Image (cartoon, grey):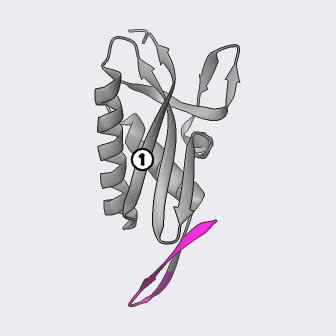
Amino acid sequence: MSIELTTKDGRVTITNEVISTVAGGAAIECYGIIGMASKNQLKDGIAEILRKENFSKGVVVQQEGDQVSIDMYIIVSYGTKISEIAHNVQSQVKYTLDKTLGLPIKAVNIYIQGVRVQAE
């Protein structure tokens, strides 16, 4: 699926993969995020960290008319306050998608797939 925006100069089509990549990039910049995890790849209780080119596996974009909802699957750092991390990710993703792609976001749902100790 994709989203079509009509401007005075013509139409712009934005695919869900682009939305996922932008949202994933915004999320991993937040403090306390180790990385993105795949929605479907939990094996033996261990979530694999996705690379930048695979962010679309950890972000699910849902469209209902002109409203967009995003589900994000993340791995957080041990010793951080999970509720604050989730709130920061929601704010950052909404802001980035609005400013970068011009998309108003209805909801950003955060799913914590794991907690990891960061090696220093």
State whether residue 60 is above or below residue 5: above
Question: What residue is shown at x 57% (from left), y 34% (from top)?
Answer: 51
Whether residue 117 sits left or right of residue 54 in the image: it is left
Judge whether residue 31 can be spotted in this image.
no
Q: Position of residue 44 (x, y in %)?
A: 70, 13
Quadrant location of residue 103? bottom left
Q: Amino acid at mark 1?
A: Val
State whether residue 11 is above or below residue 97: below
Question: What residue is shown at x 45% (from left), y 48% (from top)?
Answer: 23
Q: Residues within 10 Å of mark 1 (few under 14, many from 20)?
A: many
Quadrant location of residue 113? top right
Q: Residue 9 lies in magenta, yes or no?
A: yes
Q: Position of residue 109 (x, y in %)?
A: 45, 42
* Circle 1 residue: 108
Q: How many marks?
A: 1
Q: Quadrant of the N terminus?
A: bottom right
Q: Quadrant of the C terminus?
A: top left
Mark 1 lies on a secondary structure that is strand
What secondary structure is the stretch in magenta mostly built from? Answer: strand
Question: What residue is shown at x 37% (from left), y 48% (from top)?
Answer: 93
Judge whether residue 16 can be spotted in this image.
yes
Q: Position of residue 104 (x, y in %)?
A: 36, 64
Is 111 or 117 nearer to us in this picture?
Answer: 111
The residue lying furthest to the front in this view is 64
Q: Which stretch is magenta? A: 1-11
Whether residue 88 sits left or right of residue 40 in the image: it is left
Is 49 or 76 nearer to us in this picture?
Answer: 76
Q: Residue 106 lies in magenta, yes or no?
A: no
Is 44 or 120 nearer to us in this picture?
Answer: 44
